[in-house]
Amino acid sequence: MADKLHFDLVSPERRLFAGDVDQVVVPGEEGDFGVLPEHAPFMSVIRPGAITVMNGNETEKTFIHGGFAEVTPAGLTILAEEAIPLSEIDADKLAQDLADAREDISAAKSDEEREHAEALVVKFEAMQAALAA
Amino acid sequence: MASLKDLKTRIDSVKSTQKITKAMQMVAAAKLRRAQEAAESARPYAERMGSVMANLSTTMSGTPGASPLLVGTGADDTRLLVVMTADRGLCGGFNTNIVKKARERVQALKAEGKSIKIMCVGKKGAEQLKRLFGPYIVDSIELSGEKTITGSTAIMIGDKIRHMFEAGEFDTCELISSEFVSVISQKPRAKVLIPAKDAIDEGVERPDLAGAVYDAEPDEESILNVLLPRYVDTVILSSLLENVAGEMGSKMAAMDNATRNAGELIDKLNIIYNRTRQAQITTELTEIISGAEAL
């Protein structure tokens, strides 16, 4: 049995992480799931939230927005539209952004603007939840 | 014959042109490096996306009710050509080559009796195509507002295409852009975007599952529905990035040529300048000598 899981985290603009880790916990559309080495082939849509990468004694959390996970015998791949390390998120600024986005919803003039603002609110709320966890 | 002063002005003006082309070449070289890096770093995502799609499409395309983005509408009467060019000129034959390819495709499709719609991305191509196929152009997008190409640019274009597709304005879609072969060589290329199945079938590497079957969550169909639009965006993004790299490569080569030509012209003008000056001196001397002899 392979003792390490090969893990790739890629966004459309660049490769964010590639390497061997012990375990990754991913927030799937229908619930969180952990991926260990030798996991059966599996694919899932990811809901906005934080993935937890465990390697040795280190754990690292990264916020993922709009993504997709694929497990193959070669390892785990996460295709993320946006990925931000939790340590880089500023809670105060986030609260401010969230308040701004909420204001935008009520101030929106067109449906398009409102949809855009609503999507932002959902994203920021997910970020706050990830921070609080 | 031009006077010495005229020649001098001429040489000076060519020299300043040479300075400009040289500067443009260096700017293009720097931008090329950045564009290449961007194209390179977008590749892993595109590759992964391609292999996931390949997997899903083999299991899904046989089933009824598969997304029309994947299998097409069943008809092939109207084709949308998305022509991607640069927003700026002065980059050799880059834009012209893409437009030429587009023209070939339009003529071939017309011969097959299909109706055609054209969407232009980039200003230069739009200008050239407007003259040739004005009535076919349904939309034209300029990118000069954006400093760098990002995912959101591709999503914007992808959204437009999908809206048109859902409204039934076309059946199939083809992307015409430049393939970045190397710094000195770019080839115009046409590839199918919708139905995605045809694009995916064109040799994507499939991961070896060792006989295992995927478990999917929620289920394959909903995953595919989420993933297909994103796949379209990814293809558009990588074409855009490749185009930028090609544009810069082409511009660098064109400006290098221009700099060299200016250098040659300066050499030639210098020779003429020197000869003219020598001729003037000789004439003056002859006049003086013959004047002295006459005395």
Image (cartoon, rainbow, N blue to C red):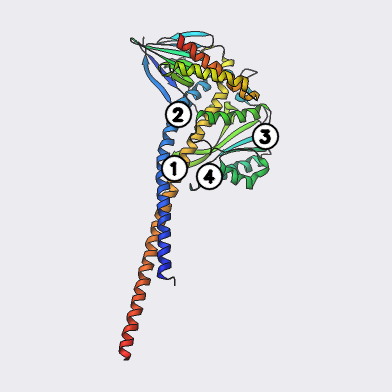
The answer to whether residue B127 is seen in the rendering is: yes
Query: Of residues B105 and B275, which is closer to you in this image?
Result: B275
Instruction: Identify the residue at horizontal 54%, vertical 46% (top origin).
Output: B96
Considering every residue shown, the one lying at the far bottom of the view is: B295
According to the picture, the residue beneath numbered tag 2 turns out to be: B43
According to the picture, the residue beneath numbered tag 4 turns out to be: B95
The image shows residue B284 at horizontal and vertical percentages of 34, 79
The image shows residue B217 at horizontal and vertical percentages of 54, 11
Instruction: Identify the residue at horizontal 33%, vertical 87% (top origin).
Output: B291
Query: Of residues B46 and A29, which is closer to you in this image?
Result: A29
Specify the subunit that label 1 lies on: B
Q: Nearer the viewer, mark 3 or mark 4?
A: 4
Residue B249's tag is: 1
Residue B260's tag is: none
Disc 2 versus disc 3: distance between alpha carbons? Answer: 31 Å
Kind of residue at badge 1: Gly
The image shows residue B107 at horizontal and vertical percentages of 63, 43
Q: Is residue B274 above or below residue A59?
A: below
Secondary structure beneath dot 3 equals strand
According to the picture, the residue beneath numbered tag 3 turns out to be: B78
Specify the subunit that label 4 lies on: B
**Marks 4 and 2, the one that precedes in the sequence:** 2
Q: Residues within 10 Å of mark 3 (few under 14, many from 20)?
A: some
Q: Is residue A51 above or below residue B1?
A: above
Image quarter (top left, top right, bottom left or bottom right) of the C terminus of chain A: top left
